[in-house]
Amino acid sequence: MMKIGRGKNYCLFQNQPGNLIMNLAKLTTKWVAFFLLAVSSSAWSADAPLPPDAQVLIGKKIPAAVKGKAVGAIPGFLSLGGALVGNDTHGRMLGYDEGVMSDGSPLLVVSATDNDRNMEILDVLKLPPDLMTWYFEGDFKYALQHHPSKNFKWRRGREYYILSDSCEINHAEVKDQIIFALIYQEKGKEDCSHFSKHVKKAWMLDKKTWRLKTLPTKNMRCQYVAEDDCY
């Protein structure tokens, strides 16, 4: 699995010469868009029920596509990308994928894979559909069989969230824990990697149940990934 890339950003307010009324109209339109995103953010709940097709994935065991070499496909799921994040007590590789179900629902899928590349889905989380930096566009079945990467598009703006798998609490690394968080970047650091304190929601992978549980975000900061580092 690969780390997903990042899109470019834009400034919400731009000083442009020209007709004052036209500029005010543009500004008003941007404020309306920002307000709608804020409403969407407050309305979204991480505890919202999963789509039925996603719910049945939890605990599902998927045989290897090629033993020892390639994992099998997750049914009805199209992956944007993900990463390996550790190992479980059985020595299986723990990883995650971001992607969509056939109904367009954006998901976080956490899995464990053994050396033969047999995979078990540990947990599934629904991500906020209108607040992620990425979204899916196009025919799902066609994308599933051809070039799915072309169907994932990027949104621009500080108000959109990315998923981070690297977090600190009180500026110290959280050892022996796997944490996922929804974050957005610090102002002025839109195009470079840094640790952001703007954490919307966080989850920890419980090592007893191997399910995700909500984690307090106080004094937490998580890595925002871009092509270059902030200095």
Image: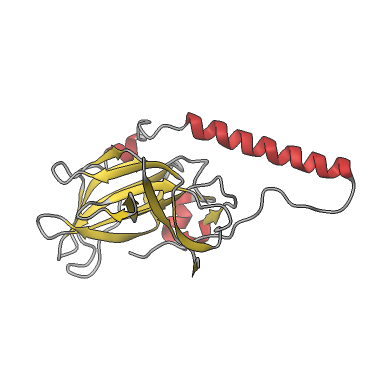
Q: How is the image coloured?
A: secondary structure
Depth order, front residue of 218/14:
218
**Do we see residue 124 in this rendering?**
yes
Q: Is residue 70 left or right of residue 38?
A: left
Closest to the observer: 61 or 37?
Answer: 37
Residue drawn at x 59%, y 50% is: 157
How far across and down, in percent of the image, does residue 197 sit?
A: 44, 48
In the visual, does 107 lie left or right of 39?
left
194 relative to 213, above or below: below
Q: Residue at x 15, y 65 (%)?
A: 116
Q: Specify whether 99 is left or right of 216.
A: right
For the point 45% across and 40% down, the residue is 128
Q: Is residue 75 visible?
A: no
Q: Position of residue 135 (x, y in %)?
A: 51, 49
In this rendered view, identify the residue nearer to me: 91 or 206.
206
Residue at the spot x=33%, y=49% of the render? Answer: 170
- The residue closer to the viewer here, 170 or 205, is 170
Q: Is residue 2 above or below residue 142?
A: below
